Image (cartoon, grey):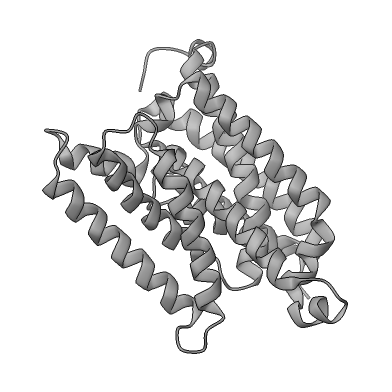
Amino acid sequence: MNSLSLMDYLNMPFVQYALIVGILISLCASLFGVSLVLKRFSFIGDGLSHVAFGAIAVASIFNLSNDMVVTMPVTIMTAILLLKSGQNTKVKGDAAIAMFSVSAMALGYLILNIFKTSTNLAGDVCDTLFGSVAIITLKKSDVILTVVVAILVILFYILFYNRIFSVTFDESFTQATGKNAGLYNLMIAVVTAVIIVLAMNLVGSLLISALIIFPALSAMRIFYSFKGVVIYAGILSVLVTTSGLLISILCTTPVGATIVACDIVVFFVSAIIGIILHRG
């Protein structure tokens, strides 16, 4: 346990940056996580995060100061390909995700080994996979980028809430009413890819799915309406991420793993509350 108090840490810029980024990313992830879980496409977060890991490996070869130049477009293109392949009867959505996920992870690690740019390869890979360092080394430019993207994502969700609701539950009906369901699915996939790339600084590529899945599942234990689940998931995600970040800083535990551990606890508490509320 550290000797510094919580207030001492809260006055430090790196903690403030981490909290701002963590809260915004977790909120965005939870909003779209509800739709992804209901559409049974929640594993896309895991697949895209592994693709992002492979893209980071490629970016490291060229010693790019900002790996998002490679990571963002590659992850977005993969999200589009996953959406298209998921509609192909020859390659189902879950199989396509698994294929991209395993391939990108293996190739990324292979590239890092062949073109070593660091003497501590194992440490670099661990940081990328579990997000143990990146979130506390954020620069002001990273925070500004996250704030801008988060505002755009939240505005998109609010403006297209009815369309998102529609394609989540009945794509055929959405198409029948003259709306382009495929376009909205594509937009959801692209926004999800953007969120995942940003979230890699928070929890690492292996734990990103937790930000998408757990808040939605926890909210579904208590609420049955779509709006209720979305609002509660957003609140839960922000509270859990904030708690996880502060606990990890005070107790010097891995950031990503601590946030996921908090998510697990909240899920079981929500499940118990749900059983009590809906008994009989």
Identified at 24% across, 38% down, the residue is 124
**Which quadrant holds the C terminus?**
bottom right
Horizontal and vertical percent position of residue 147: 63, 31
- Residue 123 drawn above or below residue 246: below
**Which quadrant holds the N terminus?**
top left
Horizontal and vertical percent position of residue 40: 59, 73
Identified at 15% across, 35% down, the residue is 120
Figure quadrant of residue 98: bottom left
- Residue 253 drawn above or below residue 144: below
Residue 262 visible, this orientation: yes
- Residue 81 drawn above or below residue 91: above
Residue nearer the viewer, 62 or 268: 62
Q: As drawn, which residue projects farthest toward the bottom?
A: 89
Residue nearer the viewer, 252 or 3: 252
Residue nearer the viewer, 280 or 32: 32
Left or right: residue 232 versus residue 36 is right
Horizontal and vertical percent position of residue 246: 50, 28
Identified at 39% across, 24% down, the residue is 137
Left or right: residue 214 versus residue 116 is right
Residue 267 visible, this orientation: no
Figure quadrant of residue 27: top right
Identified at 49% across, 59% down, the residue is 77
Q: How many marks?
A: 0
Horizontal and vertical percent position of residue 113: 13, 48
- Residue 144 drawn above or below residue 72: above
Left or right: residue 96 versus residue 148 is left
